[in-house]
Amino acid sequence: IFSNPTTMAEQAKVLKDALVSSAATGEPVSENAAVNQLVLYNCTGGAETTLARAIIEELEENIVKIYLFDEGRTVLCEREELVKLPAPLLAIPPMLVYKLADFDPAVCQASTVLKAETVF
C-alpha cells in the first residue's frame, strides 16, 4: 500500500506536488456528487488556495460535508469547490496514516492502523 518514499516529509512533498499538478485536470462533480465519492477540494479564498483530497459525507442543496482524509478533519463547502479526484492522486496513501503513529510502513497496513476498510 505504501509507495517509495516512505517518510512522512517525503510523502507530504509527493502529495503536494501531485495536488498542484492535478488541480486543473479534475472534472466538476456539481450535480453528479454522491455520498462516499472521492473528490479534490479546490477552495480559493483571498490570496490562498486550498487543495485537498476528500470523501463526500453528506449532501444538502448547494452545501457539501466532506472529510479531508489527509488531514483528518471535516469541512463544509460548496459543490463548485469539488472536482472528481484525478487518477494520479489515488496512488498516494492518505497522509493521516503517517500522522497516526510511528510505525514501519513495510509491516503495517493502512486498514490495520485506521481499523477500517481501505477507501480506495
Image: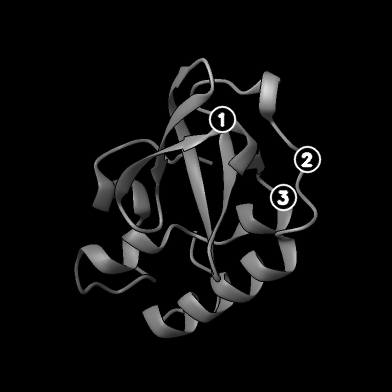
How crowded pointer 1 is (Cα within 10 Å; few <14, some 14-19, many 20+) is rated as some
For mark 3, what is the residue? 86
Q: Residue at x 53, y 64 (%)?
A: 46
The label number, if any, that marks residue 52 in the structure image:
none
Q: Amino acid at mark 2?
A: Glu
How crowded pointer 3 is (Cα within 10 Å; few <14, some 14-19, many 20+) is rated as some
How crowded pointer 2 is (Cα within 10 Å; few <14, some 14-19, many 20+) is rated as some
Instruction: Evaluate if marks 3 and 2 touch, with contact meaning CB atoms under 8 Å apart.
Output: no
Residue 9 against residue 106 in the figure, above or below: below
Instruction: Evaluate if marks 2 and 1 touch, with contact meaning CB atoms under 8 Å apart.
Output: no
Q: Nearer the viewer, mark 3 or mark 2?
A: 2
For mark 2, what is the residue? 27
Q: Residue at x 27, y 67 (%)?
A: 99
Q: Secondary structure at mark 1?
A: loop
Residue 107 spot, x, y in % from top left? 33, 67
* Residue that lies at the very extreme toward the front in this rendered image: 46
Q: Nearer the viewer, mark 2 or mark 1?
A: 2
Q: Residue at x 47, y 76 (%)?
A: 12
Color theme of the render? one colour
Residue 38 against residue 91 in the figure, above or below: above
Between discs 3 and 1, the one toward the N terminus: 1
Q: Secondary structure at mark 3?
A: loop
Q: Amino acid at mark 1?
A: Gln
For mark 1, what is the residue? 37
Between discs 2 and 1, the one toward the N terminus: 2
